[in-house]
């Protein structure tokens, strides 16, 4: 009797040990962070100084992200690849820009199936597809 209890405990400790070893490290979980936009407002223009950095974090061409913001804000703008800055011909707050960037992340970057940001946008004719490299899911998204 005592022998079998000892055996059980041994098994139990063994299982616990295995369980702890299987727990993955915590990195990668939680919210995907994009850099806080550095916004400068001059007259009727708004400059996003770290626009290139933000676009790289979103894993999308800055020209594409720029076009998205221009459409959402109904404003003209110009991305300068040399400085990495985007100039928008509209007065807009950092908070609003941040909201649109988060929306872009949710719609055009994050996989709705598994939550991975390891994705790419594919254009098939008039249709845009968000293709996930992690789980293989394909999701049609609204073109802009
Ligand atoms: Zn996925």
Image: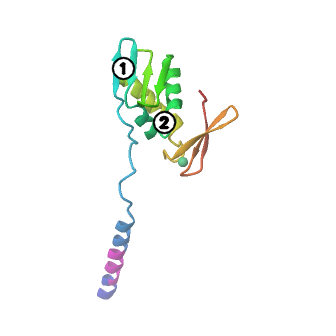
Verify whether residue 19 appears in magenta: no
User: How many numbered marks appear?
Assistant: 2
Q: Position of residue 114 (x, y in %)?
A: 51, 48
Disc 2 on helix, strand or loop?
A: helix
Judging depth in this view, the residue of 67 and 142 nearest the camera is 67
Residue drawn at point x = 56 percent, y = 43 percent: 120
Q: Position of residue 142 (x, y in %)?
A: 60, 30
Q: Main secondary structure of the magenta part?
A: helix
Q: Is residue 47 left or right of residue 75?
A: left
Q: Which mark is residue 139?
A: none
Q: Position of residue 63 (x, y in %)?
A: 52, 30
Disc 1 and disc 2: Cα gap in Å?
20 Å
Q: Earlier in the sequence, mark 1 or mark 2?
A: 1
Q: Is mark 2 within 8 Å of ligand 1?
A: no
Residue drawn at point x = 35 percent, y = 54 percent: 26
The quadrant of the rendering that contains the C terminus is top right
User: Can you say whether 25 is above or below 140 in the image?
Assistant: below
Judging depth in this view, the residue of 78 and 35 nearest the camera is 78
Give the residue number, with chain letter if any, for mark 2.
106
- Furthest residue to the front? 82
Q: Which mark is residue 93?
A: 1
* Quadrant of residue 41 within the rendered picture: top left
User: Can you say whether 28 is above or below 98 in the image?
Assistant: below
Disc 1 on helix, strand or loop?
A: loop
Q: Which residues are magenta?
A: 7-14
């Amino acid at each position: 009797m005592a022998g079998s209890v000892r055996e059980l405990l041994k098994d139990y400790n063994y299982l616990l040990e295995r369980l702890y070893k299987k727990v993955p490290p915590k990195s990668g979980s939680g919210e995907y962070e994009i850099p806080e936009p550095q916004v400068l407002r001059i007259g009727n223009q708004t400059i996003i100084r770290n626009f290139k950095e933000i676009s790289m974090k979103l894993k999308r061409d800055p020209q594409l992200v720029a076009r998205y913001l221009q459409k959402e804000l109904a404003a003209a703008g110009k991305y300068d690849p040399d400085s990495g800055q985007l100039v928008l011909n509209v007065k807009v707050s950092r908070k609003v820009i941040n909201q649109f960037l988060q929306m872009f992340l949710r719609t055009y970057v994050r996989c709705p199936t598994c939550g991975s940001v390891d994705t790419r946008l594919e254009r098939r004719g008039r249709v845009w597809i968000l293709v996930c490299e992690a789980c293989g899911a394909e999701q049609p998204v609204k073109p802009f």
